[in-house]
Image (cartoon, rainbow, N blue to C red):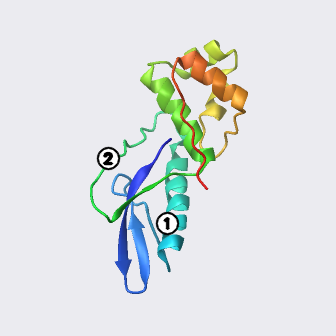
Amino acid sequence: MIQYQAKLHKEGSGYWLEFPDLPGCFTQGKSRAEALENAREALSLWLEEARDPHWDIPVPKARRGRQYVWVAPYEDVSIPLMIRQARQRKGLSQRELAKKLGMSVQQLQKLECPGKSNPTVRTLAAVSEALAEQLRIELVA
């Protein structure tokens, strides 16, 4: 699952978070819980901009310190990006993977599009098999 670390700051009676790996991605909240909830939304919106298949998704770096927390984007953003990253690791083009899956390039592009993709479990299993790679998906409440 895709996750990024956010640096949590306490300021006055509220909190704000920034994502060091994602320039310009930050948010705030009146409480720690609200700030973390807002961080998930901010992260998802930032990563949703990865609709361009040539846009490189920054690699998250692990940092030490109690002020760092891991945040996962919404599933409709995370899963398409996981599929894209797995395809790229295998060195396949969208056309090559689409052919392996027996679908059109347009269908694969939609499958890899954050915020637009809604694959079935069967489709995810087919992608995993076609790439000979495990896709680890965790649903975060």
Q: Is residue 97 above or below residue 59?
A: above
Q: Is residue 70 above or below residue 135?
A: below
Query: In which quadrant of the rendered view does residue 91 lie?
Result: top left
Q: Residue at x 46, y 25 (%)?
A: 88
Disc 2 is placed on an element classified as loop
Q: Which residue is mark 2?
A: 61
Q: Which residue is mark 1?
A: 36
Q: Position of residue 107 (x, y in %)?
A: 69, 27
Horizontally, residue 4 falls left or right of residue 48, namely left
Q: How many marks?
A: 2
Amino acid type at mark 1: Leu
Q: Residue at x 46, y 33 (%)?
A: 54
Q: Is residue 67 above or below residue 20?
A: below
Amino acid type at mark 2: Lys
Disc 1 is placed on an element classified as helix
Horizontally, residue 49 falls left or right of residue 56, namely right
Q: CA distance from mark 2 to mark 1?
A: 19 Å
Query: In which quadrant of the rendered view does residue 99 lie?
Result: top right
Q: Is residue 24 above or below residue 89?
A: below
Q: Position of residue 29 (x, y in %)?
A: 49, 75
Q: Position of residue 92 (x, y in %)?
A: 49, 18
**Tag shown at residue 92:** none
Horizontally, residue 47 falls left or right of residue 21, namely right
Classed neighbour count for the residue bearing mark 1: other residues with Cα under 10 Å, few (<14), some (14–19), many (≥20):
many
First reached walking from the N terminus: tag 2 or tag 1: 1
* Towards the viewer: 99 or 61: 61
Quarter of the picture containing the C terminus is bottom right
Q: Residue at x 54, y 19 (%)?
A: 131
Horizontally, residue 117 falls left or right of residue 77, namely right
Classed neighbour count for the residue bearing mark 2: other residues with Cα under 10 Å, few (<14), some (14–19), many (≥20):
few
* Towards the viewer: 140 or 114: 140
